[in-house]
């Protein structure tokens, strides 16, 4: 169909990002941010982490926290695929973007 926009395929766009090796941070960062936006998982970058959930958290609080946590988890997994192995090992699994 003409005029229909197809969603980006992660496996296709992932390779447009150079692997971070230390001397290419500016280009790497620009492309990572662009790709996270294309994949619609850039919420963590645009919004501060919401307060931790408690027994008094509302359904809205839970939804916002879950959205932020999912965005952070997926963003971290994606970013790690584009970082040189020698650097990747020093990144804490539970770090925030």
Image (cartoon, rainbow, N blue to C red):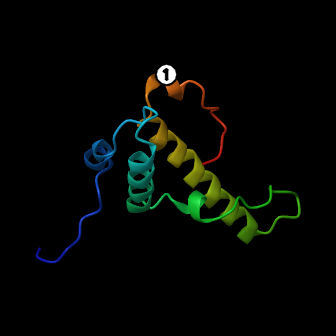
Residue density around tag 1, few if under 14, some if 14–19, many if 20 or more, within 10 Å = few
65 relative position to 39: left or right = right
Q: How many marks?
A: 1
| Residue at image point 45% right, 62% down | 40
Task: Specify the farthest residue to the left.
Answer: 2
Out of 46 and 1, give the one closest to the viewer.
Answer: 46
Task: Give the answer, above or below, for where 34 lies relative to 10.
Answer: below
Q: Position of residue 37 (x, y in %)?
A: 43, 61
What element does badge 1 sit on?
A: helix
Q: Within the image, what quadrant is residue 34 found in?
A: bottom left
Task: Specify the farthest residue to the front.
Answer: 23
Out of 55 and 9, give the one closest to the viewer.
Answer: 9
3 relative position to 86: left or right = left
Residue carrying label 1: 86
Task: Give the answer, above or below, for where 21 lies relative to 18.
Answer: above
9 relative position to 48: left or right = left
| Residue at image point 60% right, 48% down | 97
| Residue at image point 11% right, 74% down | 1
Q: Within the image, what quadrant is residue 81 found in?
A: top left
Q: Position of residue 57 (x, y in %)?
A: 83, 64
Task: Specify the farthest residue to the bottom.
Answer: 3
């Amino acid at each position: 169909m003409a005029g229909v926009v197809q969603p980006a395929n992660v496996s296709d766009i992932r390779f447009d990002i150079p692997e971070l090796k230390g001397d290419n941070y500016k280009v790497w960062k620009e492309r990572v941010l662009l790709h996270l936006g294309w994949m619609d998982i850039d919420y963590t970058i645009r919004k501060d982490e919401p307060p931790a959930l408690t027994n008094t958290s509302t359904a809205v609080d839970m939804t916002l926290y879950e959205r932020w946590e999912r965005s952070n988890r997926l963003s971290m997994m994606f970013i790690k695929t584009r970082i040189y192995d020698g650097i990747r090992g020093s990144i804490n699994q539970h770090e925030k973007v």
